[in-house]
Every structure is written in structure tokens, then in C-alpha cells.
Image (cartoon, rainbow, N blue to C red):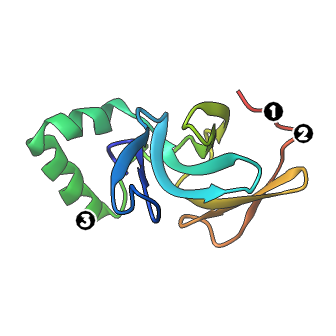
Amino acid sequence: TPMRRCKKYYLQGKRKGTVDKFIDDLPGMPDNIRYDGKGHYWIALAMAQTLSWDLAQRCPFKRKGLAIMERYIGRRPQEEKNGGFLVVDEKGRAILHYYDPGLSLVSSGVEIGNHLYCGSIAYPYIIRFNLTQYPNI
């Protein structure tokens, strides 16, 4: 998740058991991916990319500090926001991006009609977005 990328794992065929790059440099940290049967993958983004996380990837001391903070406080302050979804095609090209500053720790979602139903480990309920009312960016 912190690497902000998704990989493709081949389950069958002559490339069975191999792994390829699917999409790199996501605008947030992926938590789940779901195929919609229409040629698109919906990637749940738990939270947006932040400078703090980028620095933590390069600096072990900062990473350890974040881990200690999470252990004793429970969450990293002001880190877990701007969650949402990135929709990509079968080649891994971004098509749509839905996000909201109030969303955090989005872990799953399914499109049904004109609505997107989202699950999150931060909320004890399902979030419903009207996709026609809230256009993507």
C-alpha cells in the first residue's frame, strides 16, 4: 500500500505465476481492487499521497516515529484523508478519479447503477455516492 502501485499476477496461461507492473505512482494508497465486468478496475484509495508518507519511505527514522505514534495515539494525525477511487482500464491507464477530503481509509466499493457504494474501516456504515451528481476529476 505505501508504495502506491498495483501489480498484475497471472493465474493461467504461459505466464502463469509471473508478476508484471499494472499501474505505478497512484494518487493515493491502494487498499483493494475490483473488476466491474465492463473493462474497468476500481481501485480503492485509502488515503491520498502525502509528503509525510513520501519522506517515511526514504527515511527509516521517520517511519519508526510514525509507527510509534500510531501505536500510542491510534492514528497518524491529519494523514488519513482524501480517500476515494481511481478507475483504470485493463491496461492500467487512469480513466476516472473520485475522491473527497472527508473520506478516509476507503477499503472497497462497487458500482451499482448510478451509485458507488463504499466500505471503509473508519466508518460503521456504507457510504453511497451518486456518480452523476458528483463528477470525477
64 horizontally vs 35: left or right:
left
Labels 2 & 3 near each other (Cβ < 8 A): no
Q: The C terminus appears in which quarter of the rendering?
A: top right
Count neighbours of disc 3 (C-alpha within 10 A) and say few if under 14, some if 14 to 19, many if 20 or more.
Answer: few
State the SS at label 2.
loop
Labels 2 & 1 near each other (Cβ < 8 A): yes
Classify 43 as above or below 25: below
User: Of marks 3 and 1, which one's residue comes earlier in the chain?
Assistant: 3
Residue drawn at x 41%, y 57% is: 14
Residue drawn at x 54%, y 37% is: 92
Which residue in the protein does label 3 denote? Answer: 72
Count neighbours of disc 2 (C-alpha within 10 A) and say few if under 14, some if 14 to 19, many if 20 or more.
Answer: few
User: Could one spot residue 77 in this view of the protein?
Assistant: yes
**Mark in the foreground, 3 or 1:** 1
| Of the pair 129 and 17, the residue shown nearer to us | 17
Which residue in the protein does label 1 denote? Answer: 135
Which residue in the protein does label 2 denote? Answer: 132
User: Could one spot residue 5 in this view of the protein?
Assistant: no
**Mark in the foreground, 2 or 3:** 2
Residue drawn at x 9%, y 43% is: 61
State the SS at label 1.
loop
Residue 17: give x, y in percent of width and height: 34, 62
- Real-space Cα separation, disc 2 to disc 1, in angstroms: 6 Å
- Type of residue at label 1? Pro
75 horizontally vs 131: left or right:
left
119 horizontally vs 66: left or right:
right
